[in-house]
Image (cartoon, rainbow, N blue to C red):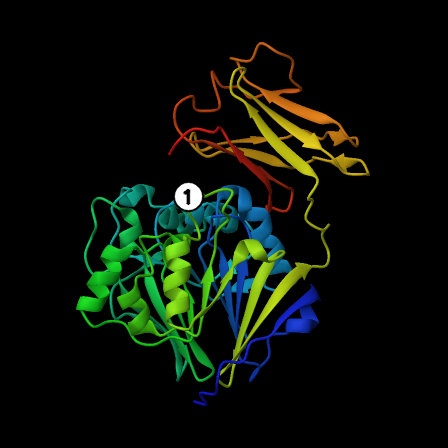
Amino acid sequence: MKKPGIFLILLVFLFTVPSFAIAENEGVSLVCLNIGKADCMLLLYKDQAYLIDTGYEQNAPALFTMLSHCGITHLNGVFLTHCHEDHEGGLMALAKSDIAVESWYAAEIYHDVKESKHPMLLAAQERGEIVSWLGADDQIFLDDDTSFTVLGPLTADTENENNNSLVLHFSSPHGSILFAGDMKEEEEYELLKANRLSPADVLKCGHHGDNKATGLNFLRAVQPRIALILTNTLEERDTPASSTLSRLAAVGCKTYVSQDFDDAIWVTLKDGDITVHDVIWNQIPARETSLRLTIDMADDRLLIKYTGKDELSLRDWQVYSSKGNDLIALPDVTLQPGETYIIGSKASKKEYDLKWDKKRVWHENKLDHAILYDAWGRMIACTDNGKPE
């Protein structure tokens, strides 16, 4: 395979399906959604499509928007890297959709959940289908010289499910990609010790660019040309960590972070060249930027302030409390410029527009995030309660 100097282009497209038609000899494409601190990626090769993780439950509309814009009605495979909400949340919505799924893949090693409650098993059972449980050295072939190879996990981590992440090395004549899931330094060390790592052109960094992942020895083994970090600093304060970014720079790797893009990062590998595009889906409204969130801790209320110039419908929007892992759907309400919409709880004494049917929503002592998602599953605004982690 040709190995030229790295070739990178950063462009903005109003996305249409013909612009990125899946055609033979058009290389490999990887689409990474900008949905906050959550993973959801689509790999396209020839006429095949593979989904790697599905984000949070509230990101499901963004998942379906991506599939629709890419013309996908059939997935050759769906991979779940590990059993955390920001990776498996959209699985059941996918299982209940009209999208055909040929194979459901998950790691045979996991810890935080019973087999009968495993999210991938539940999704497959929704359709009367089975899960293919993957272990080290298993391979999924797309054609004779293109495949996914399972690198890990090698052993079960009973303390941190992130280190049970399914780690995949995708190899093709056009280039290679390492999907690290939420792997942290312990699983990285285990793969290094077992001599399981090989160079990859693109690295999807582990654990959203956390400082306890993507170590220097790991990077020296992988030798990535570009790195992708899927996170949002407002939602996860220490990601991407400055130390992680420094390590990536030290090995000469160019890094792209999902929060710096519009709807998605689109990476194309073709004949050894890499192009990076900023995608804007063209059949949905532009991401709203005129909403501000404030948590009133004294009265357990969330204030949504709208500063835009035109009225705004909140139909099918949702608010998420990270500490309580709670979600509330907003009613079909329209905000006028300058209006503030207030969500209260059973603890609230002051006025509010919508009651969250909970004794109390926002945690009084520990860090809690309020995240606003639009009808297309995109993170629109985020704030926290000002408490320490």
Indicate the position of residue 327 as horizontal and vertical percent values: 52, 32
Residue with the most extreme bottom position: 2
Which quadrant would the C terminus be assigned to in this image? Answer: top left
Of 311 and 56, which appears nearest the observer? 311
Which quadrant would the N terminus be assigned to in this image? Answer: bottom left
Label 1: which residue? 85
Q: Secondary structure at mark 1?
A: helix
> Taking 104 as reference, is 290 above or below it?
above
Residue with the most extreme top position: 349
Q: Quadrant of residue 244?
A: bottom left
169 left or right of 237? left
Identify which residue is drawn at 47% across, 63% down: 228
12 left or right of 204? right
Identify which residue is drawn at 42% across, 21% down: 364
Q: How many marks are shown on the rendered structure?
A: 1
Indicate the position of residue 323 as horizontal and vertical percent values: 42, 31
Identified by mark 1, the residue type is: Glu
Of 287 and 365, which appears nearest the observer? 365
Q: Can you see residue 141?
A: no
Identify which residue is drawn at 28% across, 45% down: 115
Identify which residue is drawn at 67% across, 37% down: 291
Q: Quadrant of residue 328?
A: top right
Q: Can you see residue 158?
A: yes
> Taking 126 as reference, is 367 above or below it?
above
Indicate the position of residue 353 as horizontal and vertical percent values: 67, 19
Of 103 and 14, which appears nearest the observer? 14
Quick one: label 1, few (<14), some, or many (20+) residues within 10 Å?
some
Indicate the position of residue 203 as horizontal and vertical percent values: 41, 67
Residue with the most extreme right position: 310
